[in-house]
Image (spheres, rainbow, N blue to C red):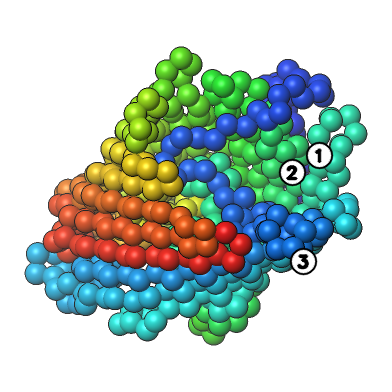
C-alpha cells in the first residue's frame, strides 16, 4: 500500500469530519446519539462483542460473578437446506430452452464458533480470539470456493489498544492489529456474510476514533483479504489491500444519520495457482477507489423511514499486457423507503426498495483501452439481495417490496417479492455462474460451442433475470434460535437465453444453540 494513499485517506476523513461536525472537540450531551436503521437486514453485527458472547459476570453463573474482564461465548448453528433447480449450478446438459436442470440437493451445514476477549484487567491492552469451524454433509456438488467448508479457522486473532480519552478530541481511540472480521455501513459492501457457512476475514489494522454512542466516530482500516482454504489455515494472497475510512455523523440522528466513506483497493497481478485448494485464478494488477455516502433515518413527525446509498468507483481497473490501462468508471445506488404502523399490535412495516448497480458496457472494449463500467462488489453480505442467495451488487437492477410483522413478542415474520434485471444484458453475473459483470462480451466468440455462455451473452436480447418471492419466520428461545424459510424463483427471458429457464425452490430450517442465552 502506497504511503500517499494513507495520507490522502486521513486527509479526506478528517476534512469531512471538520466540515460536517460543529462540535468536533466539544463535550457530548446525549447518552447516545446512535440510531439504528429500520431498513431490512442492514444493521452491522458488532464483531468485537458478538451477540452470542457475554461478559462472564453477566452470565448468571455464581463462579463468574466477579469476572468482568472476560467476554466469552460459544454457539453452534445447524441448517438443513433443500434446493431444486439451483440456478447457481451448471446445466446438466444443453443451454437455453433445451437445457436439463442439475440434480436437486439436500444437505446439512454446520458452523461452530468460540469467542474469547480479555479487556479491562490489562488495559490499554486487550486480546481477542474467535475460532470458527465450518463443515457440511457431502452432496453432488463440490465446494470449490470455500462457501461451505473452512475447518477450524481463527477468523479473529488480534491485539487491541484502547485509550478512553484521546487528547484534544474528548473521544476514545482503539487500535487493532492482526486477523479480524467486521461489518460496516449497510453490510452490502463489507460484511461478515453471516448467512453463509464461512466468514469474510482480513489481516491488517483497524483504527476507531470515538464510539458508536458519540456525536461522531471514524473507522479507518488497512487490511488484506484472506484466501480461504478448505482444510488449511487461511492466508493472504500476494499484495492485495483494502483500505479506507468511514465517518459516521450522528449530530442529527433524530432526522438523519450520515456516513460518507472512501474505500480503495490495490492488488498485484498473479498467475493462475493450480497447487492450492481452492484453485486461485489469474488476476490483473489493479488500483482503484470508491467514494460514497449513506443517509438513513426517520422523517420527523411520521413513521416513514429511509435508507439511501450512492457509490462512485474510479481508478485503474487493470493493465493490459501492452501497458495500456483500463479505467474503472462504475457506480451504484440503492434506496429503501418504509412505513411502520407503530400503533398496531403486530408493528407491521411495509417497504419498497430499488437498486441499480452498473455492469460493464459492451461498447467499450477493454483490449482497445476502453473503460470498465462494471461495479466491483467488494466483500459484502449477499443475503439482503436474494433469499435464494443468487445475487450480489453486480450488473443488477433490483426492485422489491417487503412486509415485516411481529405477531407476538420475539416472533418475527418477513416476506418479500422482488424482480431482477441486468444493468447490461451483454455482461454476466458471477454469482449465477454466468461470466461476470465486469466483462461484457463485445465480440462474438470464435467458437460458439466451446464458448457457449459468452456466445449467449453476446446475442442476448432480454434483460429480465427473474422474480423471487420469499418468506422467513424466526423465534429465539433462551438458548436456541430457530429460523425457517422458503424462496421461490422464476427465471426471466435473459436467464433462459444465457443459461436455462424454469423455477427454483429453496427451503431451509436452521437452529442455533447458544451457551449463554
Categorize mark 1 by other alpha carbons within 10 Å: few (<14), some (14-19), many (20+): some
Residue at 43% over, 27% down: 305
Determine contact: label 2, label 1, CB under 8 Å. Answer: yes
Query: Mark 3 and 2 residues: CB-CB less than 8 Å, in contact?
Result: no
Q: Which residue is mark 1?
A: 172
Q: In the rendering, at what x and y percent does residue 51 appear?
A: 59, 54
Residue named by callout 2: 208
Residue 125 location in percent, x, y?
86, 56
The residue that mark 3 highlights is 63
How far apart, in angstroms, are the residues tagged by discs 3 and 1? 32 Å
Residue 245, placed above or below residue 380: above
Question: Upstream in the sequence, badge 3 or badge 1?
Answer: 3
- Identify the residue at image location x=43%, y=28%: 306
- At x 68%, y 58%, the residue is 60
Q: Secondary structure at mark 3?
A: helix
Q: Position of residue 56 (x, y in %)?
A: 73, 60
Residue drawn at point x = 66 percent, y = 49 percent = 243
Label 2: state its secondary structure: strand
Q: Nearer the viewer, mark 2 or mark 1?
A: 1
In the picture, which quadrant includes the C terminus? bottom right
Q: Which mark is residue 497?
A: none
Is 347 or 318 nearer to us in this picture? 347
Residue 349 relative to residue 454: left or right? right
Amino acid at each position: 500500500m502506497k504511503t500517499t494513499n494513507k495520507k490522502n485517506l486521513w486527509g479526506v476523513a478528517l476534512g469531512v469530519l471538520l466540515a460536517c461536525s460543529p462540535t468536533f472537540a466539544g463535550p457530548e450531551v446525549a447518552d447516545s446519539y446512535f440510531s439504528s436503521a429500520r431498513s431490512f437486514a442492514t444493521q452491522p453485527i458488532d464483531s468485537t462483542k458478538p451477540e452470542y458472547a457475554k461478559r462472564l459476570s453477566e452470565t448468571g453463573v455464581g463462579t463468574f460473578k466477579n469476572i468482568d474482564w472476560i467476554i466469552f461465548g460459544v454457539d453452534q448453528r445447524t441448517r438443513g437446506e433443500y434446493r431444486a433447480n439451483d440456478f447457481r449450478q451448471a446445466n446438466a446438459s444443453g443451454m437455453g430452452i433445451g437445457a436439463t436442470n442439475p440434480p436437486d440437493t439436500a444437505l446439512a451445514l454446520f458452523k461452530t464458533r468460540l469467542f474469547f476477549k480479555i479487556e479491562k484487567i490489562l488495559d490499554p491492552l486487550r486480546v481477542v480470539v474467535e475460532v470458527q469451524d465450518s463443515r457440511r454433509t457431502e452432496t453432488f456438488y463440490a465446494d470449490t470456493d470455500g462457501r461451505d467448508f473452512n475447518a477450524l479457522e481463527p477468523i479473529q486473532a488480534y491485539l487491541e489498544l484502547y485509550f478512553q480519552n484521546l487528547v484534544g478530541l474528548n473521544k476514545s481511540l482503539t487500535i487493532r492489529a492482526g486477523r479480524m472480521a467486521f461489518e460496516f455501513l449497510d453490510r452490502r459492501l463489507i460484511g461478515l456474510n453471516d448467512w453463509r457457512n464461512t466468514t469474510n476475514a482480513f489481516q491488517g489494522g483497524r483504527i476507531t476514533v470515538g464510539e458508536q454512542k458519540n456525536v461522531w466516530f471514524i473507522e479507518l482500516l488497512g487490511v488484506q483479504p484472506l484466501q480461504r482454504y478448505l482444510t488449511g489455515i487461511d492466508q493472504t494472497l500476494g499484495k492485495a489491500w483494502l483500505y479506507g475510512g468511514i465517518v459516521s455523523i450522528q449530530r442529527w440522528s433524530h432526522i438523519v444519520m450520515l456516513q460518507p466513506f472512501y474505500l480503495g483497493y490495490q492488488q498485484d497481478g498473479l498467475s493462475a495457482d493450480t497447487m492450492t485448494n481452492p484453485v486461485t485464478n489469474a488476476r490483473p494488477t489493479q488500483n482503484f477507489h470508491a467514494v460514497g455516502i449513506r443517509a438513513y433515518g426517520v422523517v420527523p413527525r411520521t413513521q416513514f423511514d429511509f435508507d439511501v446509498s450512492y457509490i462512485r468507483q474510479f481508478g485503474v481497473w487493470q493493465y493490459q499486457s501492452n501497458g495500456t490501462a483500463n479505467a474503472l468508471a462504475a457506480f451504484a445506488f440503492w434506496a429503501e423507503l418504509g412505513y411502520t404502523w407503530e400503533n398496531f399490535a403486530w408493528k407491521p412495516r411495509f417497504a419498497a426498495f430499488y437498486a441499480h448497480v452498473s455492469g460493464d458496457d459492451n461498447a467499450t472494449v477493454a483490449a482497445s483501452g476502453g473503460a470498465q463500467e462494471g461495479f466491483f462488489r467488494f466483500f459484502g453480505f449477499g443475503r439482503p439481495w436474494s433469499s435464494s442467495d443468487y445475487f450480489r451488487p453486480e450488473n443488477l437492477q433490483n426492485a422489491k417490496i417487503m412486509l415485516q410483522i411481529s405477531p407476538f413478542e420475539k416472533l418475527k415474520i418477513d416476506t418479500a417479492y422482488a424482480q431482477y434485471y441486468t444493468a447490461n444484458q451483454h455482461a454476466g453475473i458471477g454469482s449465477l455462474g454466468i461470466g461476470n459483470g465486469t466483462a461484457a462480451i463485445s465480440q462474438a466468440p470464435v467458437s460458439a460451442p466451446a464458448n457457449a455462455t459468452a456466445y449467449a451473452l453476446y446475442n442476448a436480447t432480454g434483460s429480465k433475470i427473474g422474480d423471487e418471492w420469499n418468506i422467513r419466520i424466526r423465534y429465539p428461545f433462551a438458548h436456541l434460535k430457530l429460523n425457517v424459510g422458503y424462496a421461490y424463483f422464476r427465471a426471466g427471458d435473459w436467464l433462459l437465453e444465457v443459461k436455462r429457464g424454469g423455477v427454483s425452490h429453496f427451503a431451509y430450517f436452521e437452529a442455533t444453540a447458544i451457551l449463554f442465552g
